[in-house]
Image: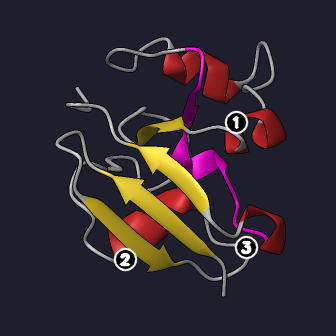
Amino acid sequence: MPKVTYIEHNGREHVVEVPLGLSVMRGAVDNNIPGIDADCGGECACATCHVYVQEPWFAQLGPPQPGSQEASMLSFAAVAQPNSRLSCQIKMSEALDGLVVRLPEGQH
């Protein structure tokens, strides 16, 4: 099963196995990772699952599609950066085994 490393704003790391096809957000919620609120439950409607995708993973995933719901929602995210993504929109695959995401200081 592929693994994701979630790094809290304070530097604490959590390595979690996330089943194929589930979102990075769902992996965090199911494993009680602090820092991902997921208020909308993964419907891409709130930006409270905002993460910073570390390289080289961001190069692989890329930014959200311009004009997409994700791009729109990220405009509401606290402290969005060029490598920001909504974790509800990242689906786990074997190619993402080892993915590393950092969590912002807050989600609101």
For disc 3, the marked residue is: 21
Residue appearing at x 57%, y 39% in the figure: 54
Question: Residue 90 location, x and y as percent?
Answer: 66, 51
Q: Which residues are magenta?
A: 82-93
> How far is disc 2 from disc 1 in space, using C-alphas?
23 Å
Q: In the displayed orientation, state which residue is furthest to the left.
A: 10
The amino acid pointed to by label 2 is Asp
For disc 1, the marked residue is: 58
Which residue is more in the foreground, 20 or 55?
55
The picture quadrant where one finds residue 60 is: top right
Question: Residue 31 location, x and y as percent?
Answer: 33, 77
The amino acid pointed to by label 3 is Gly
Residue appearing at x 49%, y 15% in the figure: 81
- The earlier-in-sequence mark between 3 and 2 is 3
The tag on residue 30 is: 2
Question: Residue 13 location, x and y as percent?
Answer: 30, 61
